Image (tube, rainbow, N blue to C red):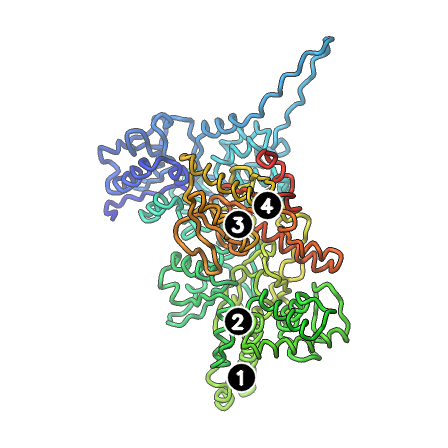
Amino acid sequence: MNTSGVTLRLLDKADKEILKLPRTVKGAFFDFQHKFRSNPHTTGLKLQQLKGDSKLWSARVNDEYRALLLRLADDDWLIVSVKHRKDVYNRLSYGVNQVTGGIEYVDLEVVEDSVLRRLPAPPAPVPAPAEPAAPAQPEPVRPLFTDWSDQQLSELGVAEPLLPVIRTLATEDQLLGLVEYAPQLTGEVLLALFDGASYDDVLDQVTRPVAATEPVDPDDFEAAAQRPATVVTTTDDALREALESGDFGRWKVFLHPTQARLVERRYSGPARVGGGPGTGKTIVALHRVRHLVRQLPPGRDKPVLLTTYNKNLAADLRSRLLELGGEELLSRVEVSHVDQLALRIVREAEPGSGKQAIDDSQAVREWRGLLDELGENAWDPEFLHDEWTQVILGQAVGTRTDYFRARRAGRGRNIGRAERAEIWQLAERFTQRLDRLGRQTWDQVAERAARQEMGREQRIQNIARQREETGGLDNIHLQDGSGGWLRHRYRHIVVDEAQDLRPAHWKMLRGMAPRGADDLFLVGDTHQRIYKNQVTLGSLGVNIRGRSSKLSLSYRTTRQILRSALGVLGETTYDDLDGSEETLAGYRSVLSGELPAGHAFPDWTSEREGVAALIAEWDADTETAVPHEQIAICVPTNQMAAEVAYTLKLHGIDSVEIRSDGPHGSTGVHIGTMFRFKGLEYQRMVIAGVADGIVPREAVNNLRDKDPVRYRQETQRARSLLFVAATRARDSVDVFWHGKPSPFLDDSWVDTPESAS
């Protein structure tokens, strides 16, 4: 415990440096910062001011490494770097950014060296012609940022000491070399301009969200250290977590100002936050829950619901919420996956019902069985199942007449009144069949729960209307007749992965919270929709119009992976859950890494052998090897997952199956179908079996002429699954196929050296 009164903080860029240090140096650094807090003037630390600098000091970490510190005040210190002793006297620059008001530090020699290392290779020599010719004049290289003045770049928040280096940049590779060591805002601004954004767009979308709200004094480092733009780690626990796990868990203590604005804003009704993979949508949802709980009056109830579409993700949300705010926070929040929530409501209303819940594939088999029994071959069982779930159950349609009037937007095939009558009759026969078998689908559960909550909300509104008519007096008989003093189940509802909820889920959730400020808060990305639940929220009573925001900066996926993953989506258009189009325009990353690799094989057996060989190759490189639990293999089917696991076992590589409730086992490479990896992330991602006829399935290709609308929907879903799989990776993605590659893979995957071999 620190009793000396010394404050020691660690700048964001410095903690990332430390993660790359040898293990022994990390341990020495942890000891160092503890000793420094106790007494910075301990002889062994050799604290001394750098010559010619008024604020920068160095201190001994061990024989080889030194910490560089800014002295903000007498007993207030900020570690800006940890360097080998020979690099302590590099040309170092630090200051207060005039736009954000945060402290920035740059090692100019390291930046320049990184840029120089990435100079384009000289052209190969050309044999001299038989007759002398006039020497060819080389094409002048146009620097990347010629179109913007130093003043404009500074106004956008670019670190001014880097302007001379920026003027020399001529290739994307050189730009990435600078971004690796530049302050984050500088990297974001330069990459956004390089990607084609205008000055005004960058100012509005990148700079203004992080700009200081008060005038900035460039000499006041103490004030600068307190601003959100100066990202720091201050506690022993946070540092220990970083050194032991390789992750500072910044999400628990730091939100990007853009995220913080969305978390803390007061909304007049339902609100939605979108954004691509890795942009922090789930982090925003978790912090939003904490923010809402902090506004609650004292109590022991759980007026905040945090929900998502499956059990695995709900368990992850619970553990992360516990990590964020402890038992005190969790005690005021109900965390449940949405089907579990619906089932609980149905069981409350229908005690004693012991029906078995079945999934969509089982339900389609039952439809097929019904049609076979009836000798009916005019209808496709999958079409009927989708019509029943998305329209009849999804809109809680209760009568034949209501079905005749039901909206079928996005369903594609137009059906007349006579066909609707026939479908309604088949749906009634189907529900009778399930009743006889003692089964129910999850869509039925959701629809029954929606009816219960819609009825509850209607009774609450009737009571409120009665109270208003009687001048504020309660009608005791009306209350008793409703089965007790009615109230909504929750005050606030936060939904993660909103794009994958069923239509009836939204009707259920809408009835669970009183309509008004901060009632529903949704996060999700329709580009990652992996189920068929295409909804328009406004038609289901959830009006988000005018209250939608988008996150665009990825904290997980590198630029190289991001570019290839976006290619998987093709030219397909995606909705925004409210009837308009959603795009990933402006989606970007400041992270850089390996190019994704493609691997072609003649057959499935040799492809599996290739996967095993790649993992063995990674293991053999001790410098870059990662724990097997940080490697995932994603395949299209359960059968393929089992076959890959068997091949790995033959090569002495353990594996862990990813099931609907998460990993089953603790040690080994994680293997599962594409559906299982939503919400997860890994250092290395292998996607196998990405062959034509498998991704997408041949059955989908067969719909091209027979049912063009369903073909587009199923193709879009298959693209989204592959997109989700590719964007689970932090460091590398390797895609394998046998025979002909999937049509979803563009040249960035197929034309790599590995695939050509």
Mark 2 secondary-structure assignment: strand
Rate crowding at label 1 as few (under 14), some (14 to 19) or many (20 or more) other CA atoms within 10 Å.
many
Do the residues bearing badges 3 and 2 touch, measured as CB atoms within 8 Å? no
The x and y percentages for residue 425 are 69, 78
Q: Please, which residue is most extreme toward the top here?
A: 131
Which residue is found at the position 73% from the left and 69% from the top? Answer: 377
The x and y percentages for residue 117 are 51, 26
Residue of label 1: 463
- Tell me the tag on residue 634: 3
Which residue is found at the position 22% from the left and 33% from the top? Answer: 43
Residue of label 2: 357
- Earlier in the chain: of badge 3 and badge 2, it is 2
- Earlier in the chain: of badge 3 and badge 1, it is 1
Residue of label 4: 565
Height in image: 484 above or below 196?
A: below
In-image side of 496 versus 135 (left or right) = left
The x and y percentages for residue 147 are 64, 33
What amino acid is found at the position of numbered circle 1 in the picture? Ile
Foreground mark, 3 or 4, reads 3
Do the residues bearing badges 3 and 4 touch, measured as CB atoms within 8 Å? no
